[in-house]
Image: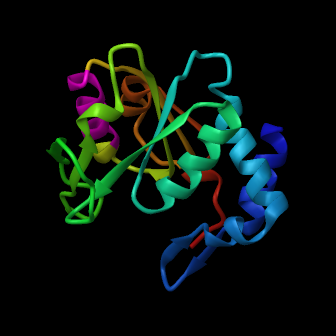
Amino acid sequence: MMSDARGLALEHFRWIGGHADVWQIFRDPGALAAVVGGLAGSFRDDGVTAVCGIESRGFLLGAAVAVELGVGFVAVRKGEGILPGEKLTRRSPPDYRGTRQELRLQRAAVGPEDRVLLVDDWIETGSQASAVRSMVEQCGGHWAGCTVIVDQTTPAHRADLGVRSIITAAELPAL
C-alpha cells in the first residue's frame, strides 16, 4: 500500500508558481484512497485512539485517516474560526516563512486515555506539530506521532515528533 501511495503522491504532485500543490491527490479517488491508506498504515498497530488534523488540509486528511483507523477526529483550528467550548491555545514557533500560527484545540476532545496521531500534508520545521503535541499532552493525552504526505524536517525534529511520511521533500520533482 505504501508503494502505491508513494507513486500516486509523486504522480499528482505539482509546483505551481513556486508553490507546492498536493490538491490533485484529493481530486483522484484512487490516489486519495492510497494516500489515506499509506498515512494510516504506518500507525495501524500503534494503539492510536484519536487523530488530530490542523486546518485545512489536515482536516481532510486527518478525518479520512481517522475513519481508516476506526477512531475519532480532533480538529485543530487556526486563528479565529468557530470552535465552541473551553480551548487550549498555542502560538507556534516560526515556520519556514517566519509565520507564527495561533492554534486551538477543544480541551474536552483529548483525555488521558488517548493516544493521538497528527496528520497533515507537509511538515517542514515541525513548529505546528510541536504546538499540537504540547496541547495534547496538556490535556493528558499521549503523543503517538505524526504522519504526513511530504516530510521536509530535520532528522532531529523527525525523531522528536515521531514523523513518518509517504515521501520526503528530496524525492519531489525539481522546482
Residue ID at (67%, 24%): 44
Please state which of residues 100 and 45 is positioned toward the viewer in this rendering: 45
**Residue 141 position (above or below residue 94):** above
Query: Image quadrant of residue 8?
Result: bottom right
Residue 21, percent from left and from top: 57, 72
Image-based side of 151 in relation to 98, left or right: right
**Residue 145 position (above or below residue 36):** above
Residue 123, percent from left and from top: 44, 48
Residue ID at (62%, 25%): 43
Total numbered labels? 0
**Residue 149 position (above or below residue 21):** above
Q: From the image, give the main secondary structure of the stretch colored magenta.
A: helix
**Residue 110 position (above or below residue 78):** above
The reply to whether residue 148 is visible in this rendering is: yes
Q: Which residues lie in the magenta part? A: 129-139
Residue ID at (28%, 36%): 130
Image-based side of 95 in relation to 174, left or right: left
Image-based side of 58 in relation to 154, left or right: right
Residue 138 drawn in magenta: yes
Residue 17 drawn in magenta: no
Query: Image quadrant of residue 110?
Result: top left
Query: Image quadrant of residue 65?
Result: top right
